């Protein structure tokens, strides 16, 4: 099987399947197809499938013309029918792994996808999970589902591995194509073949590790590292505020050291599909071993409470202007979870809006990237334009996302009071109406 698959990879006769056409799956499907592998994408949302088959892009990191050309030439298509699995040699599972209402891992999408793949799995197929999850998922959950559902034996009839997605929406340098990959599979042959498949597609290096669990833990480490360091700087920001010191100036001074320090900055909280979620997967799994991840959990407490802290600071800013938060008109600038993207998954700005409403504020938002967003069972709409009049009508403007295409000088000139949680207005003068986190 190893030799057959390596030969098919070299000749590019491997047919690829990608389960889940979101921020991870669609860019991966496009790169597979661009590399010369006929690719089929699956998604449970007919609207996404229809858009892909019409060549209409909905993911920022995908080039519109690439998608359109691949569809026109027959290199890429999408479907809602899982039976396509029987026609492919490589399956990447790229489905969401959110948290449930109790902040515990919700792996239902992974479980359901594996069960659906198992029904049509044929011999000599590679299956790779890319969804971020807890260490042990591939071997403890996915393998039994695939073996029982297909009647095939892992390692003998098919290969199974884990290769964590590394997607940073809006990153102008690193995309799916040139970001290094990690591959851990069940058995050396599986690891070699799956790694060869990625090397045939990507420009970035492919690091082979000894098991799926190592690759799963590696992904958790990446994002827990960031969670902890952001928690550290958020806590220091609170202390610096009491001491009358600018945390932003402190970090900028510290990062002049050419070794031993990496700059992280405070903000209204954590957002996105990984950093706010991944540590919960690890702490949940750790409890199975009677182990408490104290440092990680403490950083999560700090970061999770940051939206409430920012609202407390906003109340203080309004008090300085002899205005109560109850009934105050607050204009929030930016609901995306990071600058210059249209992604608001787990955005801390939405938590800030919730907390502002709890204390009686009348909240509106402006985001040039997100005209509307679904949150808390309702649809929120951006004000049509950020005009001087809109700014003047607000008692407080809160900057919660550092979009580069906002006229912050105009905001400063027209705002009664500004609370900048991203320090995006650091070069704006005068600053008498600006307070920084």
Image (cartoon, rainbow, N blue to C red):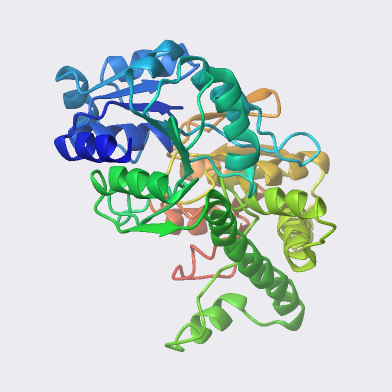
Give percent across and percent down for residue 405: 38, 49
Residue drawn at the location 29% of the way across and 15% of the way down: 53
Q: Quadrant of residue 335?
A: top right
Give percent across and percent down for residue 91: 40, 30
Instruction: Note whether 412 is above or below 370 in the view shown.
Output: below
Instruction: Note whether 416 is above or below 294 in the view shown.
Output: above
Image quarter (top left, top right, bottom left or bottom right) of the C terminus: bottom right
Give percent across and percent down for residue 202: 26, 48
Instruction: Note whether 114 is above or below 7 in the view shown.
Output: above
Image quarter (top left, top right, bottom left or bottom right) of the N terminus: top left
Residue 416 can be seen in this image: yes
227 left or right of 300 in image: left
36 vs 303, nearest the viewer: 36
232 vs 167, nearest the viewer: 167
393 vs 97, nearest the viewer: 97
Residue drawn at the location 54% of the way across and 54% of the way down: 219
Residue drawn at the location 69% of the way across and 47% of the way down: 352
Give percent across and percent down for residue 233: 64, 72
Residue drawn at the location 74% of the way across and 54% of the way down: 304
Marker count (numbered): 0
420 left or right of 122 in image: right
424 left or right of 100 in image: left
Instruction: Note whether 414 is above or below 368 in the view shown.
Output: below
Q: Quadrant of residue 205?
A: bottom left
Residue 317 can be seen in this image: no
């Amino acid at each position: 099987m190893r030799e057959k698959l390596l030969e098919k990879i070299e000749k590019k006769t491997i047919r690829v399947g990608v389960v889940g056409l979101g921020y991870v799956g669609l860019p991966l499907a496009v790169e597979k197809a661009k590399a010369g592998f006929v690719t089929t994408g699956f998604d449970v949302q007919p609207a996404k499938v229809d858009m892909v088959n019409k060549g209409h892009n909905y993911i920022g990191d995908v080039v519109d013309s690439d998608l359109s050309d691949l569809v026109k030439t027959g290199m890429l298509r999408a479907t809602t029918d899982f039976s396509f699995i029987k026609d492919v040699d490589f399956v990447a599972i790229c489905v969401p792994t959110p948290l449930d209402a109790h902040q515990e891992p919700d792996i239902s999408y992974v479980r359901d996808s594996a069960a659906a793949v198992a029904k049509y799995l044929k011999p000599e197929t590679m299956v790779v999970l890319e969804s971020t999850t807890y260490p042990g998922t591939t071997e403890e959950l996915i393998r039994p589902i695939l073996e029982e559902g297909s009647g095939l034996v892992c390692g003998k009839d098919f290969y199974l591995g884990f290769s964590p997605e590394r997607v940073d929406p809006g990153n102008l340098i690193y995309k799916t194509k040139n970001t290094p990959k990690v591959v851990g599979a069940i058995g050396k042959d599986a690891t070699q073949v799956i790694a060869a498949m990625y090397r045939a597609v990507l420009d970035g290096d492919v690091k082979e590790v000894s098991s799926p669990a190592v690759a799963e833990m590696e992904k958790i480490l990446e994002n827990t590292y960031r969670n902890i360091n952001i928690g550290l700087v958020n806590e220091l920001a609170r202390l610096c505020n009491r001491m009358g010191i600018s945390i932003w100036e402190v970090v900028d001074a510290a990062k002049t050291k050419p070794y031993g320090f990496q700059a992280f900055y405070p903000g209204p909280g954590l957002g996105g599909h990984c950093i706010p979620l991944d540590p919960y997967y690890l702490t949940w799994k750790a409890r199975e071993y009677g182990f408490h991840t104290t440092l990680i959990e403490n950083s999560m407490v700090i970061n999770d409470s940051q939206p409430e802290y920012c609202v407390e600071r906003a109340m203080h800013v309004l008090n300085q202007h002899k205005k109560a938060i109850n009934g105050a008109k607050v204009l929030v600038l930016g609901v995306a979870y990071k600058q210059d993207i249209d992604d608001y998954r787990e955005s801390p700005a939405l938590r800030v809006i919730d907390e502002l409403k709890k204390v009686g504020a009348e909240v509106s938002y402006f985001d040039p990237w997100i005209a509307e967003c679904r949150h808390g069972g309702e649809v929120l709409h951006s004000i049509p334009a950020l005009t001087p009049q809109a700014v003047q009508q607000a008692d407080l403007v809160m900057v919660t996302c550092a979009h580069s295409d906002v006229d912050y000088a105009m905001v400063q000139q027209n705002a009664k009071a500004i609370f900048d949680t991203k320090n995006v207005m650091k070069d704006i003068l005068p600053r008498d109406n600006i307070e920084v986190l």
